[in-house]
């Protein structure tokens, strides 16, 4: 009887560990989906044609749940591209940034990445400068 009780306690503990590991696996899978979605948003943003304006401008591709936003500085024609990946159940998206330049060799409105300009946090001193208006 004692052996059976100990066995039941051990099985209960193992079940709780299994449930915890399963939940962690699901959360990790959600993170990686949002991570890949954010990087895809950045890549998609590089292929888009943008207006040259100091304000944030955003474009979305609903079928793939992609959202890319761009802010360009008129003075030096550089900008900041923001790609977003939405984590299920979270209000704030997972965001990635890349510094860009207006591509003067092609038609107006295309951008090209600046080497080493990728970041997973806001590269501006004022973090509010990295949040486009809704």
Image: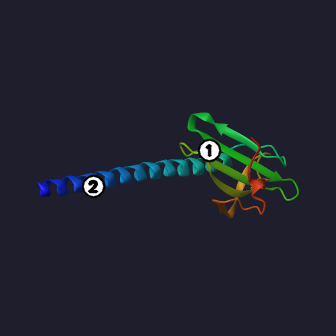
**Residue located beneath label 2 in the image:** 14
Is residue 79 left or right of 36 when viewed as pictured? right
Label 2 CA crowd tier, 10 Å (few <14, some 14–19, many 20+): few
What number is the disc on residue 91? 1
Is residue 40 left or right of 52 when viewed as pictured? left
Q: From mark 1 to mark 2, how far is it between C-alphas? A: 33 Å
Point out the frontmost of discs 1 and 2: 2
Q: Residue at x 62, y 47 (%)?
A: 93
Label 1 CA crowd tier, 10 Å (few <14, some 14–19, many 20+): few
Outermost front residue: 1
Residue 102 seen in the figure: no
Q: Residue at x 28, y 55 (%)?
A: 13
Q: Quadrant of residue 97?
A: bottom right
Q: Residue at x 59, y 49 (%)?
A: 38
Q: Quadrant of residue 98?
A: bottom right
Q: Position of residue 112 (x, y in %)?
A: 71, 54
What number is the disc on residue 35? none
Tally of numbered tags: 2
Q: Residue at x 80, y 43 (%)?
A: 51
Q: Position of residue 36 (x, y in %)?
A: 53, 50
| The C terminus sits in image quarter | top right
Is residue 113 left or right of 1 when viewed as pictured? right
Q: In the depicted view, which residue is nearer to us: 102 or 92?
A: 92
Q: Position of residue 37 (x, y in %)?
A: 56, 47
Outermost left residue: 1
């Amino acid at each position: 009887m004692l052996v059976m009780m100990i066995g039941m306690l051990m099985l209960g503990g193992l079940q709780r560990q299994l449930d915890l590991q399963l939940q962690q696996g699901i959360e990790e899978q959600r993170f990686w989906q949002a991570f890949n979605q954010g990087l895809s948003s950045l890549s998609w943003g590089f292929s888009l044609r943008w207006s040259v304006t100091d304000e944030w401008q955003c474009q979305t591709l609903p079928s793939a749940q992609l959202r890319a936003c761009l802010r360009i500085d008129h003075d030096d024609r550089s900008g900041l591209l923001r790609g977003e990946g939405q984590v299920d159940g979270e209000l704030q998206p997972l965001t990635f940034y890349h510094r860009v330049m207006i591509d003067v060799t092609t038609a107006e409105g295309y951008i090209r990445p600046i080497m080493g300009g990728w970041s997973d946090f806001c590269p501006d001193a004022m973090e509010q400068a990295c949040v486009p208006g809704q």
